[in-house]
Amino acid sequence: MQVFKEIIARWWSEFTLQTKLMAIATLVVSLFMSSLTFWAVNSIQQDAQINDTRFGRDLGLLLASNVTPLIAEDKLTEVAQFSGRFFHSTSSVRYIIYANEEGHIFFGIPFSQDEVKNSLTIQRKLELPEDYNPNVSNPVVRQHLTPNGKVTDVFVPLSLENQYLGVLAIGINPNPTVVASSNLTRDVTIAVFISIWAMVILGGVFNALTITQPIKELLLGVKNIATGNFKQRIDLPLGGELGELILSFNDMAERLEKFEEQNIEELTAEKAKLETLVSTIADGAILLDSQLKLILVNTTARRMFKWEETHIIGENLLEYLPPEVTQQLYEPLKHISQDEHTEDEKDHHNILPTRGEFRISLNPPNQNTFRILLTQVLDQNRENIKGIVMTVQDITKEAELNEAKSQFISNVSHELRTPLFNIKSFIETLFEYGDDLTEAEKLEFLQTANNETDRLTRLVNDVLDLSRLESSRSYEFTPLDLAQPIEQTLRTYQLNAKDKNIELIQDIEPSLPPIWGHYDLLLQVFTNLVGNALKFTLEEGTVTIKAYAVKANPENPSEYSHVRVEIIDTGIGIAQEDQEAIFDRFFRVENRVHTLEGTGLGLSIVKNITDKHNSRIHLVSEEGVGTTFWFDLQIYQERKLS
Ligand code: ADP
């Protein structure tokens, strides 16, 4: 029962208020109509009942007055004949029964003679109503229901001259027209009741089909359009205003769809252009939203921060940056991503995007240096922050170059200061105490000043050479016979070697193929290398210049790939740990171990020149045994062939 109630409650709650009100109104109206009709029927029936009673009583009294004398005289046959005529003369009489003073039936119509006999024989007794009094001449009337309507029973006492003779019971049929009219009224009422409901239900269905349905579809369509689904159309075959509304809706949706397509095409093209632009720029470009989540990262930025393999779009930037960068950018990023403009600024619409520039160096092993620019992206009204653009430049090379430049300048100034200081002090001494010095001392001082001047000149020349080499000036190469610069070098150092009692050996392979190079530059290489060899070789030693062609293919002796040059000395050698550093500018082992003339630039110049010849200078050295510097030069013929 409870479940049933719940089901009804749920079913009822599904209806709208309007439907509920309509159902209640219909119920009230139909109930009112039906009760009105039933009341009418009832009153008609009551009227009929009164009429039937009155009619029955009159009829009973009439019959009684006629038959009483006959019964008194015991003329039962005449009673039967009279009653028969009476019964057949009207259709209103249902039955006529006579009973004697004890209530035993002695005659009845419409019973047959036999039946009467039988009934008489079996001594059937008439059942009298309780309020029946034989001493009162007034008849008693009651009604009982039969399938054919209410039958009025009238009991009339038969008495003549105060002698009670028995009772006459007469049954009166109900009035047929009244019965028919009351039945009709009832039927009409039921029909009215049903038709009210049928009309309401039909009206509801019609309403739902013709108005509610299209309006619901339209509502759904408008909702869809509002959410951006411009493909929405309504397909309902309706005329009139609703039909026009649907047509206009479809028209509007179509226009919107076309407009959107056009817009999307334009936007996609613009986006593609911008993306291509951003991806091709040399700087790293990163776009963040105001929550610092990554929206766009170009290829350069991915490479710089090693994000090639990582899926980072939509992630928080701070979790992916190198720690040094996060450390420096955490606060600025937080600050820049928050809208910190005053109301006054906002009112005047004069907000400029906040910017920030940072220079951040990564720790080893990366050691990259980045210049990072942060710029706010403001919305159209320049009021709210939409995101942040982060531009990243890898300035590692620039930083290194700057570092090298300042190092070089400081080294050069330091190197220049020493001979200048020496010259100044000797000349000052000569100037101030010249008179107190002997001629030999004066000469010695002058000699030293002269030597220092030479050193200064050498230094300046070397610096000039090096800077000329390092500037990206291009040198014109020609085919060269290596024997010439080698012989010139040896000639220059001939006297020097003799002084030191060092043997200079020239070991050039006969018919050496010409090489591709620059005469003056190669002469400088030989000068520097042989000069060093003589400088660092003790007396009785040897310095050899060797040049020979290296065969590329041992099976074909005529095919040379390059010429190798070796400068071999039997000098003091270079310690293993210094072997790499000696090519750096101003590096001199003797700064630590001994003092010999030199600028520390010679080998840097050699390295630069061999680089210019697409070659590399190598060395093999053992302390106390000697040193060999060697490098390869390209053969001219091979170059021509290739
Ligand atoms: P410097 O002009 O002072 O010789 P270099 O650049 O030519 O400068 O040489 C750098 C250093 O390399 C020298 O100071 C020396 O210690 C070392 N060095 C160069 N050549 C030789 C060599 N043949 N034998 C031993 N040490 C050498």
Image (cartoon, rainbow, N blue to C red):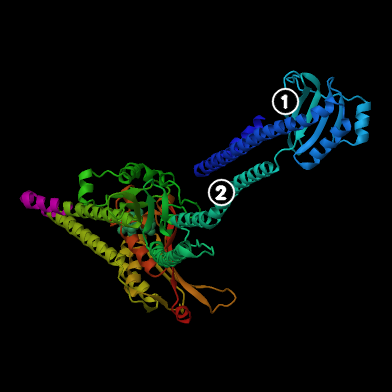
C-beta proximity under 8 Å, tags 1 and 2: no
Picture layout, residue 475 above or below residue 91 = below
Q: Secondary structure at mark 1?
A: loop
The x and y percentages for residue 476 are 33, 76
Residue type of the residue flagged with mark 2: Val
Is 506 part of what is drawn in magenta? no
Q: Nearer the viewer, mark 1 or mark 2?
A: 1
Nearer to us in this view, 143 or 280: 143
Query: In the rendering, which numbered label is found on residue 593?
Result: none
Report the magenta residues as a range. Answer: 422-440
Q: Which quadrant of the frame does ligand 1 lie within?
A: bottom left
Give the side of residue 154 with respect to residue 410, left or right.
right
Give the side of residue 488 with respect to residue 434, left or right.
right
Q: What residue appears at the point 26 percent right and 54 percent down from the top-left corner?
A: 406
Circle 2: is it few (<14), some (14-19), or many (20+) Cα within 10 Å?
some
Q: What residue appears at the point 37 percent right and 72 percent down from the top-left corner?
A: 486
Picture layout, residue 402 above or below residue 61 = below
> Upstream in the sequence, badge 1 or badge 2?
1
Q: Secondary structure at mark 2?
A: helix
User: Which residue position is annotated with label 2?
Assistant: 200
Q: Quadrant of residue 119?
A: top right
Query: Do we see residue 225 in this rendering?
Result: yes
Picture layout, residue 21 above or below residue 372 = above
User: Cα distance, mark 1 to mark 2?
Assistant: 54 Å
User: Which residue position is annotated with label 1?
Assistant: 139
Image quarter where the N terminus lies is: top right
The x and y percentages for residue 149 are 73, 37
